[in-house]
Image (tube, helix red, strand yellow):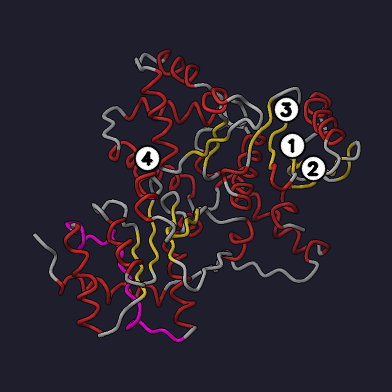
Amino acid sequence: MSISKDVIKQCLISKQREVDEAVIVNRPIDFEENGNYVIVGVRHAGKSYLLYQRVRQLQTAGKGWDEILFVDFEDERLAEFQTEDFNSLLEAHLELYGKKPVVFLDEVQNIPHWDKFVRRLADAKYRVYVTGSNAKMLSKEVATTLGGRFFIYDAYPYSFKEYLAAQQVELKEHWEYETIQRSEVKRHLNEYFYYGGLPEILSFKNKRAMLSSLYQKIYLGDICARNNIKNDRVLNILIKKMAESVKQPLSYNRLKNVIVATGSPISVPTTIDYVGYAADSWLILPMENEVGKLTEKETQKKYYFIDNGLLNLFLMNSETSLLENMVTVELFRRYGKENVYYLNADKEIDFIVPDKKLAIQVSYSIKDETTYNREVPPLVKYAKAHKDWKCLLITYDEEGTEEGIPVVPVWKWLMKV
């Protein structure tokens, strides 16, 4: 049964009020004036607020709600929405306002043939903004259908700068030299380090409990439901092992053996599928070896988590893992996940960004001699062989220079001080 246009109108009007009342932290995305966008990323990363941000920009430029159509497909009143209802969206808005709108479709991924609808809109010269939370938004089929009509934007949880803005921290010029402001930044860094930057978490006192609830009900639950996984215990073991192995290349065969050792039979192909499902949901972020052979690139990846708070659910006393994960997400945010690698050859380097000629080693502290000898000499050797590259070592709070390599505390690196 089709959804009535009266229900659609109710949804449109109530969403307008919600967007108008929302408190928005502006994020650094430069929307092309004549561009169409598909914004993808993990659930609760703030994709909807990026749409709100764009609505505010359009309103500032003079457009009103009579020229903006915003649909939230997580509205329970639209639970039965089907492909044939898409036209009713345009008709409902036209009946209300009589104008051709800019179209915003939030969390549309579960509606059949959404991609064909937005392509039709783009062909008809509508401006279209779409968000979604899974691989359906980036499948080869969808990319083929959309052609070159849409920009793809990866949405991550808050960067540390955005996190501070959301916490209403106002920094003065040269704040890093002021004891009080520097201490305030470090205090917030400690919370960001352990609990991450998912926007929804900021307002909760018991952040760990909220993160656990999000993981169990949203991330794990969504992966199982979307991929028809009956036994979530096996998937949970696999994700836990990937969390414990952050920083280390992890083969599918090793993952399979860990799961089998718990008494749950699983094949390598099923293991590969499960890892793919977790990556498709944006819960985990795979990273390839920059110099590996094709088979090694596919079978010896490192796996990081989209958010430190989610990773920390699985770890105890693993500050270096959390630090490396934090740096990973920031590198992906800055340079794109397809442009960041690890290097495991004659030298072991945590991160390589070839396009930027950037090499980074990460260690919570290098005061310990064993840690120093593991982290510093490989980077020094790499720097000598790549004199035109920028090489640095990121720590939690140590600063200086070691054998010509800048040692930078992570708070300075995150803030680009």
According to the image, label 4 marks what residue?
216
Three-letter amino acid code of the residue under disc 3? Glu
Of mark 3 and mark 4, the one earlier in the sequence is 4
According to the image, label 1 marks what residue?
361
Task: Judge whether residue 327 is colored magenta.
Answer: no
CA separation in Å, label 2 and label 3 = 14 Å
Of mark 2 and mark 1, the one earlier in the sequence is 1
Residue for point 20% across, 75% down: 91
CA separation in Å, label 3 and label 1 = 9 Å
For residue 269, side relative to residue 14 (left or right): right
Three-letter amino acid code of the residue under disc 4? Gln
Residue occupying the far right of the picture = 403
Of mark 3 and mark 1, the one earlier in the sequence is 3
Residue 154 position, x and y percent, is 50, 53
Residue 349 position, x and y percent, is 72, 32
Q: Are marks 2 and 1 in contact (CB under 8 Å)?
A: yes
Residue for point 76% across, 63% down: 180
Task: Please identify, in this view, whether the residue under mark 3 or under mark 1 is nearer the observer.
Answer: 3
CA separation in Å, label 2 and label 1 = 6 Å
Residue 385 position, x and y percent, is 84, 33
Please state the extent of the stretch shown in magenta in the rendering.
62-80
According to the image, label 3 marks what residue?
348
Element at label 1: strand
Residue 149 position, x and y percent, is 42, 61
Q: Are marks 2 and 4 in contact (CB under 8 Å)?
A: no
Of mark 2 and mark 3, the one earlier in the sequence is 3
CA separation in Å, label 4 and label 1 = 33 Å
According to the image, label 2 marks what residue?
392
Element at label 3: strand
Q: Which quarter of the figure has residue 120?
A: bottom left
